[in-house]
Every structure is written in structure tokens, then in C-alpha cells.
Image (spheres, helix red, strand yellow):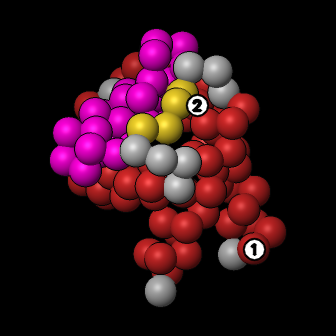
Amino acid sequence: MHFLKSWFFLALAIAFAIHFVPGIVPVGGTIAGPVFAALALALINATIKPIMKALSLPLTILTLGIFSLIVNAIALELASYLALSVFSAGIAITSFGAAFWGALFISICTAILDAVLG
């Protein structure tokens, strides 16, 4: 049940990011795009992101945590690519700047949704 709640919050945050962050557009529909992108991002966060965080730990310490935002943006780019390749639906990201601001926006929205509704 926790996975479904997290997936719903992530899909909702991605839908908000599509609306508010320029450079992130849905592919495959306004509902299917965020849902499949959230599934892909959840898989990336569970499998690849811990490895990326461990490998980037020295840079994260050196930049006082700012580099973790770059890792989040890369994870969002990977999730976008995975969703579009596997499901033919998800989100298309036009630039790394859009991925950076989108990842920051999604992180903040997910934290707020989890605090308020979780």
C-alpha cells in the first residue's frame, strides 16, 4: 500500500511539474504520461539512484550537498528515457536545465504531499 501511495504522490508531483516547469511535456496523454514517468522514476530511485549517490558522495560533500540536485536531475532524465523507451508514454525533457528545475520541483512537491496527506 505504501508503494501505491508513493507512486500516486510522485505522479501528482510530475503532473504539477509538467504544468509549472517549462521544458517538461507529457508524451502519451496528460494522465498516462505522469503515471508511467512516476513508475519509471520509482524504479530508478530504487535501483540506480543509490549507486549514483554513493559514487557522487565526495562531490556532494565538497559542494555541501548541492551536487545531490544534479544527481536528482540525472535520475529524472534517466526515468524520462526509460518511460519513453519501455512504455512509449512518459515525459519529454528538452534540456538539462528543465530536468534540474523539474527534479527540484518534484522533490519539493512530493515532500509537501507526503507531509500533508501521508
Residue at 68% from the left image edge and 44% from the top image edge: 16
Instruction: Tell me the quarter of the image containing the C terminus.
Output: bottom right
Q: Which mark is residue 117?
A: 1
Q: Which of the 4 quarters of the picture holds residue 19?
A: top right
Measured Cα–Cα span from mark 2 to mark 1: 21 Å
The residue where tag 2 is placed is 102
Of all residues shown, which one is farthest toward the front?
29
Q: Is residue 33 above or below residue 23?
A: below
The stretch of residues the image draws in magenta is 72-100
Q: Amino acid at mark 2?
A: Gly
Sequence-wise, the earlier of marks 2 and 1 is: 2
Three-letter amino acid code at disc 1? Leu
- Verify whether residue 76 appears in magenta: yes
Residue 87 located within the stretch drawn in magenta = yes
Residue 101, can we see it?
A: yes
Residue 32 % position (x, y): 45, 55
Quick one: which residue is furthest to the left in this view? Answer: 86
User: Residue 90 placed where, x, y %?
Assistant: 39, 43
Q: Residue farthest to the right?
A: 116
Q: Residues within 10 Å of mark 2 (few under 14, many from 20)?
A: many
For the stretch drawn in magenta, the main secondary structure is helix
Q: How many marks?
A: 2
* Residue 71 visible (yes or no): no
SS state under label 1: helix
Task: Please give left or right for residue 109 compared with residue 53 in the image.
Answer: right
Q: Is residue 33 left or right of residue 113?
A: left
Do tag 2 and tag 1 residues touch (Cβ < 8 Å)? no
Residue at left offset 40%, top offset 44%: 28
